[in-house]
Image: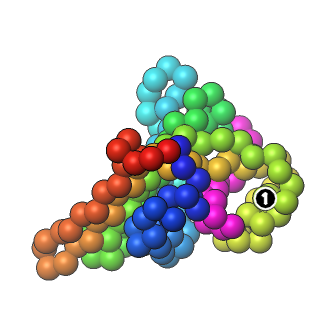
């Protein structure tokens, strides 16, 4: 698992593309795995700041339990229109709860909303990334996977 900053150091163009997609709509969809193994998909507001990919999660949200239990996630940017023009970006990996008040303050300052004091903060570590651009009915894809890379 790599932090966003380590991922960005290895794949700067891909990370910049992803950050731009996450910041464009400020909404993305996270897939998590429930305790019974079933998948869940929910909207979230990703925050990229200080070299970290972060999420605030409301208390009582099923995704809070999922991330706290096994941490597995996939995060996908919004797609602007049915033809996909504007591109899409996704990452997957494992999330970890962050209790550091300084990181929390940085995330609040960078967030598109003000999370409540009771919201949990998670850092999303990256194991793989995918970017797709669509142009005139054709698409180009860029993939990155930690497996062949040096940890």
Farthest bottom residue in view: 136
Q: Secondary structure at mark 1?
A: helix
Residue at (39, 62) in percent of width and height = 89
Indicate yes or no whether the magenta region holds residue 49: yes
Q: Give the extent of the magenta segment.
A: 46-62
Please provide percent x and percent y for residue 33: 49, 32
Residue 147 visible, this orientation: yes
Residue 28 to residue 120: above or below = below
Residue 67 to residue 45: above or below = above
Task: Give neighbour class at mark 1: few <14, some 14-19, many 20+ (Cα, 10 Å).
Answer: some
Please provide percent x and percent y for residue 62: 61, 36
Farthest top residue in view: 36
| Mark 1, residue position | 103
Rendering quarter of residue 23: bottom right
Name the residue nearer the viewer: 81 or 1: 1
Name the colouring of the figure. Answer: rainbow
Residue at (31, 57) in percent of width and height = 143
Please provide percent x and percent y for residue 79: 36, 67
């Amino acid at each position: 698992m790599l932090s966003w900053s380590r991922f960005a150091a290895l794949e700067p163009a891909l990370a910049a593309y992803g950050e731009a997609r996450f910041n464009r709509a400020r909404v993305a969809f996270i897939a998590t795995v429930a305790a019974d193994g079933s998948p869940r998909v929910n909207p979230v507001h990703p925050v990229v700041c200080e070299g970290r990919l972060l999420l605030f999660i409301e208390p009582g949200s099923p995704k809070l339990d999922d991330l706290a239990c096994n941490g597995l996630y996939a995060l996908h940017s919004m797609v602007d229109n049915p033809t996909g023009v504007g591109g899409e970006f996704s990452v997957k990996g494992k999330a970890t709860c962050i209790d550091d008040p300084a990181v929390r303050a940085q995330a609040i300052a960078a967030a598109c909303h003000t999370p409540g004091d009771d919201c949990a903060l998670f850092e999303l570590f990256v194991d793989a990334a995918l970017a797709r651009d669509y142009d005139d009915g054709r698409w180009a894809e860029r993939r990155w996977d930690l497996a062949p890379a040096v940890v």
